[in-house]
Structures are given as C-alpha cells and as structure tokens.
Amino acid sequence: MKKIKKAIIPAAGLGTRFLPETKAMPKEMLPVVDTPAIQLIVEEAKASGITDILIIIGKGKRAIEDHFDSNTELELNLAEKHKDKMLEAVQKTNGLNIYFKRQAHPNGLGDAVHTAKSFVGDDPFVIMLGDDLMQSDVPLTKQLIDSYEQTSASTLAVMRVPHEETSKYGVINPTKEISDGLYDVTSFVEKPAPEDAPSDLAIIGRYLLTPKIFEILENTKPGKGNEIQLTDAIDTLNKTDKVYAHEFKGSRFDTGNKFSWLKTNIEFGLKHPEVSEQLKSYIKELAEKINTDEK
Ligand code: UTP
C-alpha cells in the first residue's frame, strides 16, 4: 500500500465571522499566542508523515504565501546573533514541499478541494481545514492515516458536539461502531437543524479521501448556502465506496470565530513557557475583580 504523503489545506474562505479583522488579513494567519493557526496545521501534517502540501488561497491571502516562503536574511541574522530558540521557531516547517493554488471565487469547500485535482493525482490524500486545530498525543491526521492502513477506505474525523450546534457542521448518520471509535455510516448531512440531525457526531476539519472524490465533485450541484459542499460529495462517494467516520477524542480549537479564537489563545497561553505564569496570575486577578464587581 502506498504511503499517504499529500495534504491540502483549504484557506480561501472569506472569514466573514471574523470581520473586520479579515478585510485584509487571512483568518488562517490569526495568531495562537505567537504562531499563526495555519502553521500549527502544517506542523501537524509534518508530524503525521506528510511531505507535500497544497494550500488553497484566494484574494487577500498573500500573507500565507509570505509566511511559508524561506527568509534566508532573517535566518542568517538570528544564527549570527546566536538566537537559537528563535531560529528553531522560524525553521519549524522547513523540509516540506509547500505549494499554493488559487480558488477563483469562494464557492464552498467542495469547490476549493476540487482545485487540487491535478496536485493529488491518483493517490489518497488528506484535507486539513486551515482554521481548525487539533491536539492529541497521536496527531489526528496520523490517526486517520493509521486507520486507512487498516481499512483502505476514505475516513473522516468526527467529534461529539452539543445537539443544538448540529446546524454548524456536517453530521453523520452512523449505522454501527465497527471497532473502537470507527463508524460505518449510512449518510452524511450538511448543517442539519437539531430536529433533523441524525446524530451528534459532527465532521471536524480532517478528512482522508480517495481521489474518486474529484469525479464526484465535478458533478456536485451547489447545496446549502448555494455553495459546492464537500459533505454532499462525500455522501455520494459513500454510496459506491465505503467512507468511515473516526471519532476524535482529543481537544479541538476552532480559530475561525471570535469567542473560540479567544479561548484558544487563553488555553495555549496557559501552556506557553514564556507567558503561562503571568497569564495565570492575570486570570486569577481578573476573576476576583469580576466576582467583586458582580456583588
Ligand atoms: P469556513 O466555512 O470555516 O470558512 O470554511 P469561511 O467561509 O472563510 O468562514 P466564514 O463562515 O465566512 O466566517 C472552512 C475552511 O475552508 C476554507 C476556509 O478558508 C476555511 O479554512 N474555504 C471555505 C475555502 O478554502 N474556500 C471556500 O469557498 C470556503
């Protein structure tokens, strides 16, 4: 069996939930303490054995290209000044082949993925959403690759979400749990209202798919929000080729909306060696102040 080496990172969306910040700055470049969210995703890819990454960009997304461009002048400067930690930080994603492709219009995730057809070729590949961070001992992308090596089938990552939030996600209708956390699926439904949701298992930002998805995307009509929905294409794929769902049991951080991004920064900040102590004291003081003010 061929090893999975390719990943695509769709990052061409408009990021409207984060306006006005996203007028000129890609939401995928928003910092998590000191690192852009998309770099953490590229690091997960590297830790999972991925060697080639295609990042789908669009208008106003040039900062992403610049971020992954090599910066010899900066690296030389840091090396001369023996700023080893900083040098290590800027070299973390070195050694990967990173390519860029433009999605002409943000017509939906399915359309963004379709632009990667020639990059992917005949091999299975992974999709990693540019604003969705995962933390676990074994990286989630590696978990999907391990599962593929057992089943040879497309597999999506899912996670339990509060029932009232199903309308924000693609949701699966699981038939049975065939092994620990691996589900057989009858259907995949994009953003169902809670009363119509077949389960609380929502698709999160990691997918492992076979290239057959591209033929299907070519014939997928616009769905919810008048966009080409990847979930709809996956539901069609599942009718002829098995698509499993793998339940993720680690922590997920969605950096694409304001509140969730703030929480992400607090949680990552509490673990960051340079700021954790200060942040802890600050949060305690702030909590006391809020308590006093509320009395
Ligand atoms: P989202 O739905 O979270 O991103 O898509 P969005 O459309 O930018 O956000 P809002 O709803 O307007 O706030 C998940 C990922 O898919 C990419 C986004 O950049 C994001 O990383 N995406 C989405 C594309 O690449 N192209 C699209 O047409 C839509």
Image: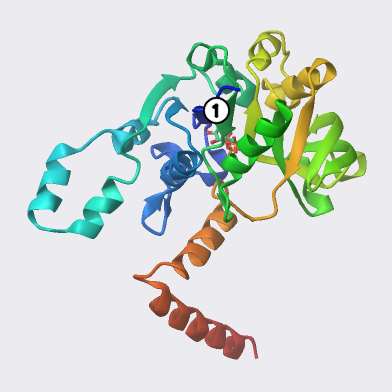
* Amino acid at pointer 1: Ile
From the image, which quarter does the N terminus lie in? top right
Residue 38: % across, % down: 45, 42
Q: Is residue 58 above or below residue 129?
A: above
Q: Which color scheme does this rendered protein use?
A: rainbow
Which residue is denoted by mark 1 in the rendering? 4
Left or right relative to 133: residue 62: left
**Quadrant hosting residue 34:** bottom left
Residue 132: % across, % down: 57, 45
Q: Is residue 10 above or below residue 258?
A: above
Q: Is the CB of the residue bearing disc 1 within 8 angstroms of ligand 1?
A: no
Specify the quarter for ligand 1. top right
Crowding around mark 1 (Cα neighbors within 10 Å: few <14, some 14 to 19, many 20+) is many
Q: Which of the pair 232/136 is nearer the observer?
A: 136
Q: Secondary structure at mark 1?
A: loop
Q: Is residue 183 above or below residue 286?
A: above
